[in-house]
Amino acid sequence: MSEWLNEHKSWLKLVLRCGWGLFWSIYVCAILVTLLISAFVIGGLMMKYYFVKEPFEIKQGLNFDYTKSKPAAYVPIVICPTSECEDKHEVLSAAGFIRVIPPKHKLQATVTMVLPESNYNINLGMFQVRVEYLSENGKSLASFSHPCMLTFKSQPIRLLLTFFKIVPLVAGYLSETQILKLKFQGYSEGIIPTACLKITMEQRAEFRPGAGIPEIYDAFVHLESELPFFKRMLWYWRRTIFVWLSMTVFAVELLFALVCCRPVLYPRSRTRSNNDRSNTQTTLEL
């Protein structure tokens, strides 16, 4: 056995050196990967709490109360101030009221309604949709109104379209509906915070109270805020800024590790330096 070891001593040293080098490569790679992961975590926390502010956004379905002369639906942002929506939504106490939308943020409300192409809606014509921003006390902060109606189609065009879509209509893949999207812009969050959103359907002046209200299948509102210019640019470029910030943190961590934690990255250099010192001390003693 000893003769075989002496004959293959050079090969054993080569295998040992390769294994030792592979071990230290894996060791250094593990440290670098740990530093990289920690850099991305730190970069994500810095982006979330210091640099980038997320715009406010809420999307909720609308349930209009058709027992009223003017059907209305409420979308509580934080608190529902009126007694009409207490049964439908959870009411928070005024003591726990917290501002959700930062001041000076522009708001845009988009009301989407799915209306059937019934004879009633076609003959109805124009009607109004009103959006009101309410405070925690139920006071109206702003009110916007938008007229709308179904897209006009003459009788021959309707018959021709129905003829071409007869198969999917009978099969149930299509329905005779129209989607109306109404955008309400021009309101900026002020000193008094917005607590609730009220959407009301109103009839024209020629109709009596309770008449002239369209038939709808479904409706929902999408409320979103617009950040200031600088914060909006940071929000649009958040992924690029996140990558660059994380790589900068990784470079700083690596530089700190090379300067202050060198023995951890290169333990063999420490052992070699210790051996050199011990050898010099022995030679001096001799």
Image (cartoon, rainbow, N blue to C red):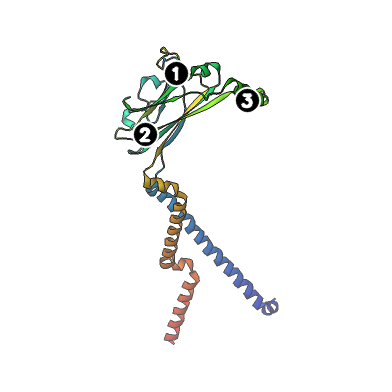
Quarter of the N terminus within the rendering:
bottom right
User: Alpha carbon of mark 2 to alpha carbon of mark 3: how far?
Assistant: 38 Å
Q: Do the residues bearing badges 2 and 1 touch, measured as CB atoms within 8 Å?
A: no
Residue 34 horizontal/vertical position (percent): 49, 58
State the CA–CA distance, disc 1 to disc 3.
34 Å
Q: Secondary structure at mark 1?
A: loop
* Count of labels in the image: 3
In terms of image quadrants, where is residue 65?
Answer: top left
Which quadrant of the figure has residue 175? top right
Assess disc 2: are there few (<14), some (14-19) or many (≥20) residues with their C-alpha within 10 Å of its C-alpha. few
What distance separates the C-alpha of mark 2 from that of mark 1? 27 Å
Tell me residue 103's x, y (percent): 32, 38
Among numbered discs 2 and 1, the one appearing first in the sequence: 1
Q: Which residue is mark 1?
A: 65
Residue 121 lies, with reference to residue 4, above or below; the image says above
Which residue is rendered at x = 65% and y = 26% of the image? 165
Question: In the rendered structure, which amino acid carries the disc numbered 2?
Answer: Gly
View extreme (bottom): residue: 286
Question: Which is more foreground, mark 1 or mark 3?
Answer: 3
Q: Which residue is mark 3?
A: 161
Question: Would residue 77 appear left or right of 172 to someone viewing this image?
Answer: left
Q: Secondary structure at mark 3?
A: helix
Callouts 2 and 3 close, C-beta under 8 Å: no
Which percent across, then down, holds residue 285? 42, 85
The residue singled out by tag 2 in the image is: 186
